[in-house]
Amino acid sequence: MADDKMTKKSRTGLCAILLFLVTTAGVSLLCFLNDYARIDMLRNVVLSGMGCFAVLFILVQSTEKHLYEYDNEEHLLRFTGLYAVCLVLAAACSYLPSEGWPFLTVFVLLALFSNTLIGISAGGLLLAISVLFAGCGTEVFVLYFTCGMIGAGLFMRLNDRDKLIVPVLLSVTFLLVGETACVVIYANQTLKWELFLVPFMNVIINIVLLFILLKFFSNMVIYKYRDKYMEINDQECTLLVELKAYSKEEYYRAVHTAYFCDRIAKKLNLDVDAVKAGGYYHRIGVLQGEVSYEKTAELIKPYAFPPAARRLLTEYLTSGNSLKSKESAVLLLADTVISSVLQLIAEDSGKQIDYDALIEKIFWEKRESTVLVECNITMREFNNMKNIFKEEKLYYDFLR
């Protein structure tokens, strides 16, 4: 674990250094190409450096608290490369009419390959650079920053069940409305259709770019581990078959825990496949005589678990009394409820169980303990989980 932490810190540090160097060097080069005076160059480099520090602070905090979406925490260099490409685009935009800037796509791209907050802050920095060098007014920054925030929010936590047409149309509709209000009406000319030409072309360009981006993102991230999850989340997976042969009690505990992990993860819009895998394999270490991270890591290594599933199992099995992610909280509560119900049934299969009281007790104990003190789950999500467990009384009777 120490080596893993060092690797993560080294990777994060390297990306932070590269992002800062790329930003300051890019702004310096842009100042040189535009023949800026030294005092103006100094101002621009300092301001861009300050903005970059803000982005880096959020990036480091996201790494420490595991706030990245998908597998982005494992691929910070990928984000760094995409940021560099967007910086070049931002520099090019300073030479183009402001009505045609594709910053909606830039914000969405940066958010998808990191998380929403990093995407908005990094996109805002690049937008500020374009506005600064183009000499645009404040309204241009507000226009694209607002549309960028909306776009990043609409495309947050994509999965294969999402209907992408609606967020695309909504985001470009906001862009068209914003451009009409901030660009066309501000032109101080007689209103005629020619004024809408560039904003309309910008909408078309962003639609095309968004669909290209979403196709690229789906192939590279969302569906990258689809086949692997289908393999390991199949109850006929070799490792689960071994668990069933070793102990049917452990096997069915894993199956029932995975069922609730799947239901709750869908309700809370979490990484369903990773949480379900956590439900199946969080106690797989019993095959080696010990439920521990070391034994679990040894058993799952030949199966090349996706990063999100490995990260969940690592946190769950090593964090002790202090879980941080929502996925770990879901796994903890699902396992606790299932194990408690199975234990009561084992003691007396004919006994009537007050499931509501049992679930209330479990959730109260977990809330009062230290295990979820640092968890980023909200009270609303916590109560939603509790309600899902209470709705499944027929399922618990099936366990008999």
Image (cartoon, rainbow, N blue to C red):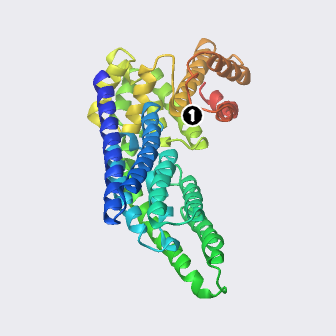
The residue that mark 1 highlights is: 260
The one nearer the camera, 185 or 188, is 188
Asked if 153 appears above or below 14 in the picture, the reply is below
Residue 300, image x, y percentages:
32, 30
Left or right for 279, reference 286 = right
The one nearer the camera, 396 or 74, is 74
Whether residue 227 can be seen here: yes
Find residue 349 and report its image quarter: top right
Q: Residue at x 65, y 16 (%)?
A: 368
Q: Please tell me how many numbered marks the rendered image carries.
A: 1
Whether residue 159 can be seen here: no
Find residue 335 and report its image quarter: top right
Q: Which amino acid does label 1 sit on?
A: Phe
Q: Residue at x 30, y 27 (%)?
A: 6
Asked if 137 appears above or below 325 in the picture, the reply is below
Residue 128, image x, y percentages:
49, 57
Q: Residues within 10 Å of mark 1 (few under 14, many from 20)?
A: many
Image quadrant holding the C terminus, namely top right
Residue farthest top in this picture:
347
Residue 89, image x, y percentages:
38, 64
Find residue 289 and report its image quarter: top left
The one nearer the camera, 390 or 27, is 27
Image quadrant holding the N terminus, namely top left
Left or right for 75, reference 53 = left
Q: Which residue is drawn at 67% across and 33% down?
A: 392
Name the secondary structure under disc 1: helix
Residue 321, image x, y percentages:
51, 16
